[in-house]
Amino acid sequence: MGKYITEKRMKRNKIDIKWSPNFAYAIGLMTTDGSMSSDGRHFDLTSKDRDQLINFMNCLKINVKIGHKTSGHTNKKITRIQFGSVNLYKFLLGIGMTPAKTKTIGELDIPSKYIFDFLRGHLDGDGCFYSYWDKRWKRSYMFYTVFISASKEHINWIQKELNKKIKIKGHINRSGDHSIYQLKYAKNESIKLLKKIYYNKNVTCLYRKRLKIEKALGIIDLTL
């Protein structure tokens, strides 16, 4: 892997390429919900959450029109933004991202200092959090934090990084149609993970997802 950029600042195309919590969060969103054109310049970020697109633009300090595209599966309109930046494109290639990355993405060169900001973006993009009462035991409330990718190499890398950083292992399984990999962390490991991801009240995040997590933790008298 190439050495990640830490100090050099490039301000062309309105994007300041410098690692920060917000920049790392935006890279997490781009990793999951974004796509890179093959022309070496253009990007598309698609999300059903308009707030997510606004967060992304705020993090990169850009302002482009929010448009729509039609989902091929549901025929519903989904919000999207499109923008261009040669410098950002080259930067993303340098840290391991490529066009048509869905099934081929592997390790990314993310500074250790910003890995949890990156993972917060990753979680907001394709990840999920769910909870339920386990009927096998009284008063047993379970919840899981899940990272999702179509690339086994990428999901293995996330698992390895989290085990190295905070000593949690999780477990990986595949969806019913075997199209995606899911890295799941159960309650005790989720608590360790979530406290790192949401390390203060002001971090950029998808508010509805954070609120869902806070409500679940509140049931067991914990807070972020």
Image (spheres, rainbow, N blue to C red):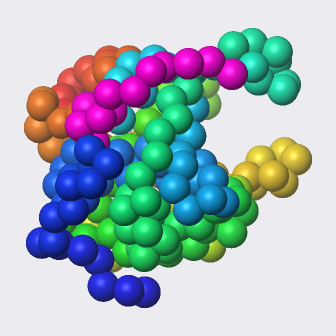
Is 100 positioned to the left or the right of 217 in the image? right
Residue 103: name its quadrant: bottom right
Residue 127 lies, with reference to residue 53, above or below; the image says below
Quadrant showing the N terminus: bottom left
Q: How many marks?
A: 0
Q: Is residue 209 visible?
A: no
Q: Residue at x 62, y 59 (%)?
A: 39
Q: Is residue 41 visible?
A: yes
Counting from the top left corner in percent of width and height, residue 47 is at 55, 27
Q: Residue at x 32, y 48 (%)?
A: 13
Residue 216 lies, with reference to residue 95, above or below; the image says above
Counting from the top left corner in percent of width and height, residue 34 is at 55, 45
Is 106 positioned to the left or the right of 84 in the image? right
Of 165 and 149, the residue lying toward us: 149
Residue 100 lies, with reference to residue 200, above or below; the image says below
Residue 135: name its quadrant: top right
Quadrant showing the C terminus: top left
Of 202 and 190, the residue lying toward us: 202
Q: Residue at x 82, y 17 (%)?
A: 74
Q: Magenta segment, which residues? A: 57-69
Magenta stretch: residue 149 in it?
no
Residue 54 lies, with reference to residue 191, above or below; the image says above
Of 36 and 148, the residue lying toward us: 36
Is 218 positioned to the left or the right of 56 in the image? left
Q: Residue furthest front?
A: 12
Residue 6: name its quadrant: bottom left
Q: Residue furthest right?
A: 177
Counting from the top left corner in percent of width and height, residue 42 is at 54, 49
Q: Residue at x 45, y 21 (%)?
A: 65
